[in-house]
Amino acid sequence: MTNEEVLAVKTELLNLSTKEYISDKGEITAFMATSADYSFIGRPLAEKDASYKQLIPYVTVICQGHILALERTTAQSEARLHGKLSLGVGGHINPVDRGRDLAQTISQAMARELGEELWLQPENQPLLAGLINDDTNSVGSVHLGIHYILQVQSRPRVRETDKMKALWVQPAQLVALRPRLETWSQILLPALAKAVHL
């Protein structure tokens, strides 16, 4: 992690509302325009400096009414995440992802992350659904999720089966699973209930 550079935007430029999940199209459009003024900074600095927000593409995969939940196994290095469920695939944007503009840069980072986590050949493009902005803890205060929804026709398999297990859940099951969901995934619940019916 020491030499990794990640895409970040100055927090003061973003002027985001206080909602944890932002789905207003006008606010998302304004965010994308403002975030075009991004830079790549060292990840160790970015993880400690709340004057920057690291942008994280976060993709929820939906197949025929079922949502992909990834369960982190004990083989993963971060013990606090063992047994936790994530309703999104995502990660940092690095210089290797750089495109002609921010939208293409995000798209290329998203494709790379999906390819690293899943055996997947998407027939559709992920659709931008909202922003996840959780300032209630030290991790959330330096990250901002750009939430996409990807509808697929067949269920992709997980690549690193020692580190993650795939569960396919219906929206009605999510409430019972809430205590096991990572924070961002808990924030997504109301939006996902609607998304499954798209």
Image: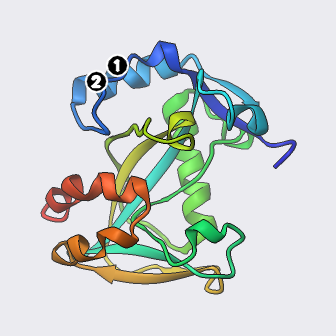
**Which of the two residues, 61 or 183, is positioned nearer the viewer here?**
183
Work out which residue is located at the far right of the displayed protein and give it.
Answer: 3
Residue where numbered disc 2 is placed = 27
The x, y position of residue 30, in whole percent, is 34, 19
Callout 2 secondary element: helix
Circle 1 residues within 10 Å: few <14, some 14–19, many ≥20: few
Q: Position of residue 106 (x, y in %)?
A: 53, 40
Q: Which residue is depicted at the point 67% across and 66% down?
A: 78
- Secondary element type, mark 1: helix
Snapshot quadrant of residue 33: top left
- Residue farthest top in this picture: 13
The residue lying at 32 percent from left, 39 percent from top is 20
- In the rendered image, residue 187, in percent from the top left (x then y), is placed at 31, 51
Q: Which residue is mark 1?
A: 30
Q: Eyeballing the image, is 147 above or below 66?
A: above
Q: Amino acid at mark 2?
A: Glu
